Amino acid sequence: MVIVSIVPFAPGRILVWVAVFSALSVANCFANSLLFSAKRTPYDHQMARIQPVLSTPVPPRRGDLSLLLVNHWIGELRAIPYRYSMEWKTPGELAHEPTGDCKGKAVALYQRMRENGAWDLRLVIGRRAPTSRSTHTWVEWTSASVTFVLDPTINWVARAVNEIPENSYVPYYAYAGSRKYRAATATSLYAGL
């Protein structure tokens, strides 16, 4: 049995619901999250040096980018030994250093994919797992109606979002070209209603 409660007209609640439903067009980017356009993020100052990479123009479509090729790039980047850097490294800097962190590897993968025609691509900052003490960076890509988590720091290949445990890869912020987003889970939105 479904119980429906009648709530008196509340303009504030209607605006929240309108925002939720309009955000659903972007929501397919993350398994259980909604993306809301943001003017600023806490990472803007740090991200300034990689903004030209994020805005890499996508060449005219030459066909779909092969998942096999993307997995090859993930493997190449995964093979680079990990070493944390306070500064966001550009792909050029990463190529000339013996080590890299999640930020550098994700940015390098993002650039390769953009240069090779990938659309619907996001650089994401969030938590890898609920127990993580620090943030993590990865790439998400939607191709042929499937969203993949591309994490060249942890994984050797792309993983479809529906293959990942629900509490893994929790996004906080996402960047797509010059656009910035703040992520919110559907449950956190509903709790505020």
Image: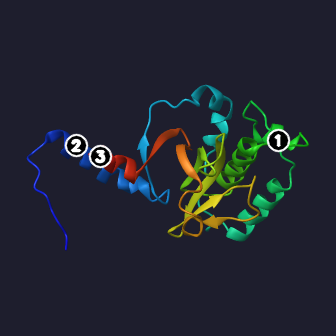
Query: Which residue, given by chain and number where applicable, does mark 2 sit on?
Result: 15
Q: Is 104 above or below relative to 121? A: above
User: Is mark 2 in CB contact (under 8 Å) with mark 3?
Assistant: yes
Amino acid carrying label 3: it is Ala
Distance in Å between CA atoms under marks 1 and 2: 45 Å
Q: Nearer the viewer, mark 3 or mark 1?
A: 3
Q: Position of residue 116 (x, y in %)?
A: 68, 57
Task: Evaluate whether residue 32 shows in this view.
Answer: yes
Q: SS class of the residue under badge 3?
A: helix
Q: Earlier in the sequence, mark 1 or mark 2?
A: 2
Q: Earlier in the sequence, mark 3 or mark 1?
A: 3
Residue closer to the observer: 34 or 192? 192
Query: Which residue, given by chain and number where applicable, does mark 3 sit on?
Result: 19
Distance in Å between CA atoms under marks 2 and 3: 6 Å
Residue lying at 66% horizontally and 45% vertically, measured from the top left: 136
Amino acid carrying label 2: it is Leu
Task: Evaluate whether residue 59 shows in this view.
Answer: no
Rendered image quadrant of residue 84: top right
Judge the density around disc 2: few (<14), some (14-19), many (≥20) Cα neighbours within 10 Å. Answer: few
